[in-house]
Amino acid sequence: MSEAAAPPDRRGEASSRISTRVVAIFKDYLGRGPTRARTIIRDNLVVCLLEDSLTRAERSLALGGRDATVRDLRREFQEVMEGDLRAAVEEILGRRVIAFMSANHTDPDYLAEVFVLEDDDGDDAFDGAMLTAVRD
């Protein structure tokens, strides 16, 4: 049984391990890691919410009104880090990551790393997720 399909206590352990690894990867690439991290695992979705992740240089740019520059720079770093981030999640959960997305917000300082996992049976369909249609 993969960790993502495991009982809640094992998912909690996997969530903690992913948070720790993601923070370490950020620290390796940027010289410092986020001070807070929380990982949520649900079906084939893993979301890492990170707080206080901006470097001193990025924070200076943001305070100077250069939020777009910070987001662009951060997006470049996340593209470079993607392989290591994917590998960490795959190793911990024992499942292949089929999609990776990042989002950044400078004030307040949050970022999200989102991983979509291949289903346990090798299919990439949603597993047990409730789907809701939105209409105009």
Image (cartoon, rainbow, N blue to C red):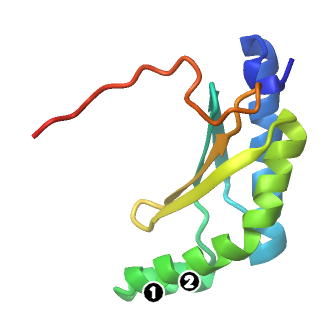
Q: Are marks 1 and 2 in contact (CB under 8 Å)?
A: yes
Residue 17: image location, x then y, percent: 83, 38
Q: Quadrant of the C terminus?
A: top left
Badge 1 crowding class, 10 Å Cα cut-off, few under 14, some 14 to 19, many 20 or more, is few
Residue 81 against residue 94 in the figure, above or below: below
Query: In this rendering, would 26 be left or right of 1?
Result: left
For label 2, the residue is 73
Q: Amino acid at mark 2?
A: Leu
Q: What kind of element bears circle 1?
A: helix
**Residue drawn at (81%, 37%), measured in percent from left and top?**
95
Query: In this rendering, would 127 be left or right of 108?
Result: right
- Total labels: the figure holds 2
Q: Nearer the viewer, residue 85 or 33?
A: 85
**Residue drawn at (66%, 77%), measured in percent from left and top?**
77
Query: In this rendering, would 99 be left or right of 135?
Result: right
Q: Nearer the viewer, residue 127 or 56?
A: 127
Q: CA distance from mark 1 to mark 2?
A: 6 Å
Q: Nearer the viewer, residue 91 or 18?
A: 91
For label 1, the residue is 69
**Residue drawn at (73%, 76%), measured in percent from left and top?**
80
Residue 88: image location, x then y, percent: 84, 50
Residue 129 against residue 29 in the figure, above or below: above
